[in-house]
Amino acid sequence: EEIEFIQALQMPGTRKDEPDLSESEMKKLTIEETQKSLPIYPFKEDLIAAMEEHQVLIIEGETGSGKTTQIPQYLTQAGYTRGEKKIGCTQPRRVAAMSVAARVSEEMGYKLGNEVGYSIRFEDCTSERTIIKYMTDGMLLREFLSEPDLGGYSVMIIDEAHERTLHTDVLFGLVKDIARFRPDLKLLISSATLDAEKFSEFFDDAPIFRIPGRRYPVDIYYTKAPEADYLDAAVVSVLQIHVTQPTGDILVFMTGQEEIETSNEMLQERTRKLGSKIKELIILPIYANLPSDMQAKIFEPTPPGARKVILATNIAETSLTIDGIKYVIDPGFCKQNSYNARTGMESLVVTPISKSNHNSQNSHNESLVVTPISKASANQRAGRAGRVSAGKCFRLYTAWAYKNELEDNTIPEIQRTNLGNVVLLLKSLGINDLIHFDFMDPPPHETLVLALEQLYALGALNNRGELTKLGRRMAEFPVDPMMSKMILASEQYQCAKEILSITAMLSVNNSIFYRPKDKVVHADTARQNFFRPGGDHLTLLNIYEQWEETDYSTQWCFENFIQHRSMKRARDVRDQLEGLLERVEIEVTSKPGDTIALRKAITAGFFYHTARLSKGGNYRTVKHQQTVMVHPNSSLFEDRPRWLIYHELVFTTKEFMRQVIEIENSWLLEVAPHYYKSKELEDGSGKKMPKNTGKTREDVTRNY
Ligand code: ADP
Ligand code: MG
């Protein structure tokens, strides 16, 4: 089996000459030589001078120029960290923040976490001595809560600005504002692509500093016909390249961890079968949840005679640069949060190009926009093949699909996501008028209104839209508003200990179970043995508590097909949450075995996510009558209770509820009498619903 590719136009490079270093020589470069070989290096002095002269500077330079790793070092040398001041640099992705911090501390000869550190959600790897701090954009947002003028920083770099993540977009407005009353703070907005003009305009015509690119040309190939199974096509393409093409590493873009694991297994299996008939193929995954020692592996040089294939998420599109890549395989997929402001439904969508038949997939929910990767994204991906020499990019879709099915640019996240979190944070910063907040591209009005309504229903805002005491406490937790409400509600139901464990487990949710291909039956049995009546949250709690009892044993995890590192992460998350609970002065009480108390606390946070079994035998969401299914992995898949609360919706072939618990409809009136009317909760079971008590939202949330 082989895939037929058609060669299309070449993507021109900015250099056509032969590479000045052969690959084997490339690998012998010392850190200093590498630094000097980066495109940004000749501009070091100019850049420092421009920074001296201007308060705000936009930097544009191709991915891999050295922006992220070098600029903070240049600025340190130029004296910007004197007087106990730090240089901050934001990253849209966790892995990038960690990996870049590790690289820079190594380049500077420091131990990670001392002079150079990083801060990501639930993990602070910095110290008193830290002068260069990499952090996710979300973490910088949270820093505004404790230090609204960013007083500890002399320079703030908003990096990867072109990614236009929700948090980065909000930061634009906040840092622009701060720059006005902190003339000593320098702002750098750094971007890989062509949005520089737009950033400049937003920041009052800040000057643009351009680092010329140094890329070799890349040949673009398309498939002759659409590929039905893109995972399989990717695997076949890897082997095809490995067998037919000269040396050079391969980069494959996948949408997430699951796909990466599956294709990894497929590749392992097929290369094993081919045995010594082919040269060595080193398969390396990279995604957000991969432990950092494994992440570091992708940067290790390929041994002579072998070939490396990196299976990566979008992270390798612009955030991370891996040297030695000559071949890129682009299936054209990406995972994007998509949000329907009309119903408030949020789900993760995986969209294959050429399968993007909007109507058939989403007929029940037309404003859930299906989005294939953009042309900009596809070209960025292709560009990754031209860093060390001329390269090739194999697109697993047709030239027609590229031309007709891809948008020019990705829609900024702020225009397609739930804003609850961000609105709560901005309110906590005292920014009340969100309609007039300085957004580069404002969110849709209805999304903003819906976020306000949801926060109001949760009790975080009062009817004038101001932050309540509950809202202030909710903002302390770096989790979604429904989750923080659930945590705070656990005080009333006296089950904070259990709710913390559940929250922690939900936060690592999709990587708890280990399911090796050759032991599927054993793994599934082990998983089912953890099931608890009542639903999946209780199952997660059960796993956590059993693990706790073994004193956090690795062996126990191994025997039960549980991923030990996910559990460790859950424990870290739990510790952090427990610390925050102390901050809001909630005692960690426990009600062992009282699953009703637990489920009521969950309901107090997630009453939006209610589904009911309809007469036709389907589940429908209560407020919007959207048809949803219980995920086949759920313990309630066969039980089919009448009323359910789900943690999240995942959209694959159907809209699936992942992590569900059974509830009673009367609880909804208990926790959200302002949101539900008795009438809409009647279910024809003959059981009488209590009348609405006339309780207000304030009555219910007064005690939180
Ligand atoms: P930019 O931000 O302009 O995209 P970077 O500063 O991220 O560029 O990358 C500059 C160089 O540093 C690249 O050649 C990249 O391969 C190298 N690099 C970055 N992180 C690591 C790492 N963890 N290990 C080895 N090399 C790295
Ligand atoms: Mg970068």
Image (spheres, rainbow, N blue to C red):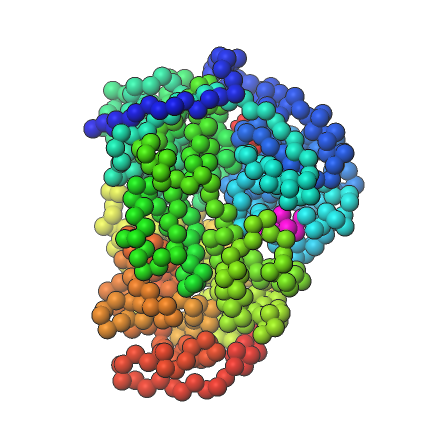
Q: Is residue 174 magenta?
A: yes
Residue at the image point whose x is 29% and y is 26% from the top: 5
In the picture, measured across the screen, residue 189 lies left or right of residue 665, that is right
| In the rendered image, the vertical position of residue 695 relative to residue 26, given as above or below | below
In reply to whether residue 696 is colored magenta, the answer given is no
Residue 280 image offset from top left, x and y in percent: 33, 22
Res 501 seen here? yes
Count of numbered badges drawn on the protein: 0
Q: Position of residue 663 (x, y in %)?
A: 36, 73
Q: State which quadrant residue 545 falls in.
A: bottom left
What range is drawn magenta here? 170-175
Question: In the depicted view, which residue is nearer to us: 598 or 565?
Answer: 598
* Residue at horizontal 39 percent and vertical 52 percent from the top: 369
Point 25% across, 20% down: residue:
277
Which one is in front, 429 or 519? 429
Q: Residue at x 48, y 86 (%)?
A: 694
Name the one closer to the observer, 432 or 686: 432
